[in-house]
Amino acid sequence: MKKTLVISDRFPLPERSGADIRTMNLARYFASLGPVDIAYLSDLRSGPVQAERADEYLGKDDIFSGKYCLQKLEYPRSLRGRFGISVRGFPYPVREYSNASMEKLFALIELGGYDYVLVRYLRNTAGFFGLSQIAKGKVIIDIDDVLTRSLYDTLFTPTNNALRILFRTINKVLLAYYQTRCVTVFGACLVCSEKDKSDLWGEQASESIFVVPNTLGMRGSGELPIESGFSRRHILLFIGALHYQPNVSGLLWFLESVYPHYRNVYPDAGLLVVGRCPLPEVIEACARTKGVELHADVPDVIKYYKDCRAVIVPLLEGSGTRLKVLEAALLDRPVISTRKGVEGLDVVSGVHFLEFDDGHSFCEAYRTLSDERTYDALVARAENIVLEKYSHGALSTSMSKVVTYIDFKKGELSSALSSSHAPAG
């Protein structure tokens, strides 16, 4: 029996977001090895709806044997304060834990008897370099999104202030250095795709970086009764967290630059926008655009998949892989996406999805779905590759390599430490 501690942004139940789904899929893998505890943040600004639903689940039975609530310090508001903590070793968005939470985490990791410590996201590793060498060896950091690439600029609001631009440039260098230290110091790092692995470390990647694909995990093909969308009206579906900047930017670009072309060709067309915590600009854009319906913080997205004919993924930035693409494939809906929207997934345009980059190419791609055989074939091929490469079994196979590596390295370290303390002669 192996014991695991998961350190997460928030308590990941109910599974309403891609981040929570990945957290729970990884936690379920570790639960197959033995007891799993969770330490989560209480001060994450995730919106009142998410917080309310999380409270409902905290008192219920789940896979977590122990639950520990953590707090982090407020990020400084002044540019001087932000620069100060960056040069002290905590580049944004890494935030320090409170003293009490840091003491609790150190006690858990050093003395809690855990074989593995899974940390979701780089930003939750503040202070962990101070752990003992043995403790650092059992820490597995799920990088998930590689922040030092195109996703970095989405962490900040646009500015023309020269000092702020300078700070963000310096912070990016410090964050890249911090990221490198994490790869070299801790037991293992996880990413979602081979591209993210290359972005993180280059062509000669460290042996401690492992690709663990995103997967829906608990939902398999045919588990949910849903008819083919071929006969549906020209209704599109966008689904995703509506406070996540890559989603927001992509959706607003689609509404302004692509959707008008689609409506010109199909006057009865519509777009369902489904997601949690929509930002004001999303609410405003949806309200003023004809044929667009915004459905915020819905308890179940299946109804909207049933009502649509195709799913759109109009992303222009970001990293990782898109759970919405996997979900659409298992719910028999074709995906029309930008290249960035399917980046990191082993899919081919025209085979598993349809690609677009502007209004004209979107309409051309959608027009191919007027043939029922083409529609069904695209859906079937997408479903097959998801079941082959992004299933719960695929995640388990990948994670088995990670824990085998951690166990081997811990054995090597224990032997080295025993040898160093052996009496001479």
Image (cartoon, rainbow, N blue to C red):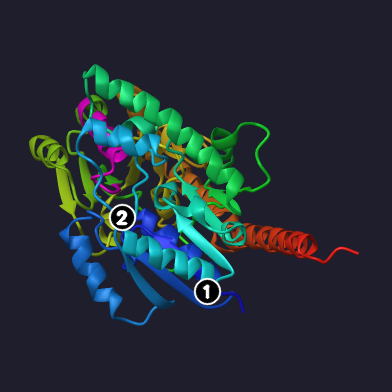
Query: Callout 1: 10 Å neighbours few (<14), some, many (20+)?
Result: many
Under tag 1, what secondary structure?
helix
Q: What label sits on residue 31 in the rendered view?
A: 1
Task: Locate residue 51, reporting x and y percent.
Answer: 21, 64
Identify the amino acid type marked 1.
Ala
Residue 372, image quadrant: top left
The residue nearer to you, when weighing 227 against 326, is: 326
Write the start and end of the magenta stretch as one range: 239-256
User: Relative to 213, is 361 on the left or the right?
Assistant: left
Secondary structure that dominates the magenta span: helix
Under tag 2, what secondary structure?
helix
As drawn, the residue found furthest toward the right would be 425
Identify the amino acid type marked 2.
Tyr
Tell me the quarter of the image containing the C terminus.
bottom right
User: Relative to 270, is 113 on the left or the right?
Assistant: right
Spatial distance from mark 2 to mark 1, Cα to Cα? 31 Å
**Image depth: mark 2 or mark 1 in front:** 1
The residue nearer to you, when weighing 141 against 97, is: 97
Q: Residue at x 28, y 59 (%)?
A: 301
Q: Residue at x 17, y 52 (%)?
A: 295
Q: Is residue 283 visible?
A: yes
Which residue matches tag 2? 305
The residue nearer to you, when weighing 170 against 343, is: 170
Vertical comparison of 78 with 388: above or below: above
Task: Locate residue 365, reporting x and y percent.
Answer: 39, 31
Sequence-wise, the earlier of marks 2 and 1 is 1
The stretch drawn in magenta includes residue 387: no
Vertical comparison of 338 with 35: above or below: above
Q: Residue at x 46, y 45 (%)?
A: 321
